[in-house]
Image (cartoon, rainbow, N blue to C red):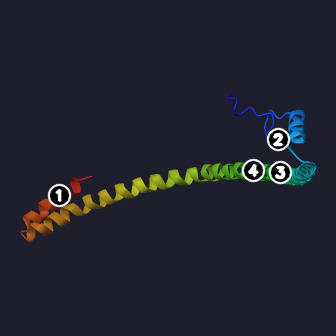
Amino acid sequence: MSEKNINPLDINGQHFEPNLYLEKLFKESTLKQVMDQENEIIKDTQTLHSDMQTLVYENYNKFITATDTVRKMKTDFKKMETEMDLLAQNMESITSFSQQISSTLQDTREQISKLSGIHSLLKRLQFLFKLPSTLKLRMEEKNYNQASIVIVLRRLP
């Protein structure tokens, strides 16, 4: 630290020496100046005291508000935890019902799949049964291109 920062006569400084300050003040000042200085220091002290009380009051209010907020958050979290538990139970119930519905419909799905396969097979058989008459009709009409297209199209999957 430089010596400029260390001033024992600076009343607001960290290294303030009250005895040195008073000695200097008594030597260099008149009685009126000393009394004026005393009044100024008393006024500054009262202002600082008032400021300190205000800060304490404000910080106390902030502490009370923070405590209330924490208490409210605790209550909200308990409520949220209860709601989450209820939601989890509802989800389990929905999952259970979904599984029951799925197992109940499994047989129906299998039957529909079989019926779909049978329907497709019947359509092919129907085509095969109609094929000779369709080909004969196209041949009688001498429409050989359309007869060959019908055969080629039915071979496609």
Labels 1 and 2 touching (C-beta < 8 A): no
Residue at image mark 2: 11
| Label 1 vs label 3, nearer the camera | 3
Residue at the spot 49% in from the left edge and 56% down from the top edge: 112
Q: How far apart in space, not on screen, are marks 3 and 4 (Cα)?
A: 26 Å
- Disc 3 residue crowd, few under 14, some 14–19, many 20+, Cα 10 Å: few
- Disc 1 residue crowd, few under 14, some 14–19, many 20+, Cα 10 Å: few
- Disc 2 residue crowd, few under 14, some 14–19, many 20+, Cα 10 Å: few
Labels 2 and 3 touching (C-beta < 8 A): no
Residue at image mark 4: 84
Q: How far apart in space, not on screen, are marks 1 and 2 (Cα)?
A: 113 Å
Q: Is 131 situated left or right of 116 in this image?
A: left
Q: Disc 1 on helix, strand or loop? A: helix
Q: Earlier in the sequence, mark 2 or mark 3?
A: 2
| Label 1 vs label 2, nearer the camera | 2
Q: How far apart in space, not on screen, are marks 1 and 3 (Cα)?
A: 85 Å
Q: Earlier in the sequence, mark 3 or mark 4?
A: 3
Given the image, on which type of amino acid does mark 1 rest? Ile
Q: Disc 2 on helix, strand or loop? A: loop
Residue 116, placed above or below residue 8? below
* Relative image position of residue 30 (x, y in whole percent): 90, 48
- The disc label shown at residue 151, or none: 1
Residue at image mark 3: 66
Say which of 27 and 78 sits in front. Answer: 27
Say which of 79 and 121 sits in front. Answer: 79
Q: Disc 3 on helix, strand or loop? A: helix
Say which of 123 and 41 sits in front. Answer: 41
Residue at the spot 20% in from the left edge and 58% down from the top edge: 153
| Label 3 vs label 4, nearer the camera | 3
* Relative image position of residue 15 (x, y in whole percent): 80, 32
Q: How far apart in space, not on screen, are marks 4 and 2 (Cα)?
A: 61 Å
